[in-house]
Image (spheres, rainbow, N blue to C red):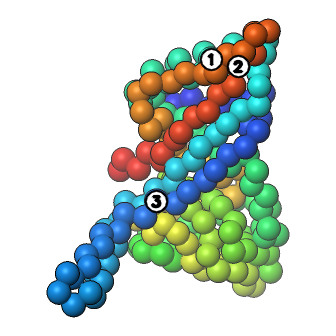
Amino acid sequence: MTDYTWPAAIIPASSEWRLISNTAVFSSPMSGTTRTVSRGGDRWACSVTTPPLKGANRQTMRAFLANLRGQASRVVLSDHSYVRRGTQAANVLVMGAAETGSTLHVDAATVSATLLTGDLFTLGGYLYMVTADATANGSGQMTLSIVPPLRSTPADNAAVTITTPTARFLLTGNSVGWNNVPGGISSFACEFVEDIAV
């Protein structure tokens, strides 16, 4: 299995990002009550569509998809439309070695800097979203409310990547292709789901 980075020259025309929750739902046929259980394993999914490509960009995209060999390899991908709202400009670190659940304590932040609702970061190769505004205290520490919940307990001082948040994705199927029109022009539509193997 090889990790490939999305080709830098290919700027998507559009993308759709989704968080898929692994929740079980049971509705009683007798009383109509509904019970839900969160089972973990939430993951990101995205659909990426390119503009019509020709020449070198067309060939680059074709080779990129062929190299994935269906679901055999992975894509390191970021949300191309993402703009961070918070003022924290540099990466931060995990604070402590017992982090679990939907809260993450970090340090090495700039005093009074913020990470705001909707900001993204990468930890341990996985993508997370901040769900409540957070401000660094006088010691550069902040507590982040996040989704999805942490998939494993990160090490103390593990890097929390704020500057370019990415995750590892795989194609949702083993067939890849593109749409061709006269003039050597192709359009590409790709469906990915986050690889959450731990």
User: With respect to residue 15, does 155 lie above or below?
Assistant: below
Q: Quadrant of residue 54?
A: top right
Amino acid found under the numbered disc labelled 2 = Ser
Q: Nearer the viewer, residue 78 or 15?
A: 15
How far apart are the two marked residues, 1 and 2, measured between alpha carbons? 9 Å
Residue 24: x percent and y percent?
30, 69
SS at circle 3? strand
SS at circle 2? strand
Q: Residue at x 57, y 77 (%)?
A: 145
- Depth check, mark 1 against mark 2: the one in front is 2
Q: Kindly check if marks 3 and 2 are in contact, taking CB atoms under 8 A apart as contact.
A: no
Q: Kindly check if marks 1 and 3 are in contact, taking CB atoms under 8 A apart as contact.
A: no
Residue 8: x percent and y percent?
74, 30
Q: Which residue is mark 3?
A: 20
Q: Residue at x 71, y 32 (%)?
A: 50
Residue 171: x percent and y percent?
48, 35
Amino acid found under the numbered disc labelled 3 = Ile
Q: Quadrant of residue 93?
A: bottom right
Residue at the far top in the pictured view: 183
Q: Which residue is mark 1?
A: 62
Q: Can the viewer see residue 1 in this picture? A: no
Q: Earlier in the sequence, mark 3 or mark 2?
A: 3
Q: Nearer the viewer, residue 169 or 28?
A: 28
Q: Residue at x 51, y 77 (%)?
A: 103
Mark 3 crowdedness (10 Å alpha carbons): few <14, some 14-19, many ≥20:
some
Amino acid found under the numbered disc labelled 1 = Arg
Q: Residue at x 56, y 57 (%)?
A: 18
User: Quadrant where the N terminus lies?
Assistant: top left
Q: Which residue is mark 2?
A: 186
Side of 59 where 170 appears, left or right: left
How far apart are the two marked residues, 1 and 3, measured between alpha carbons? 28 Å
User: With respect to residue 155, does 112 lie above or below?
Assistant: below
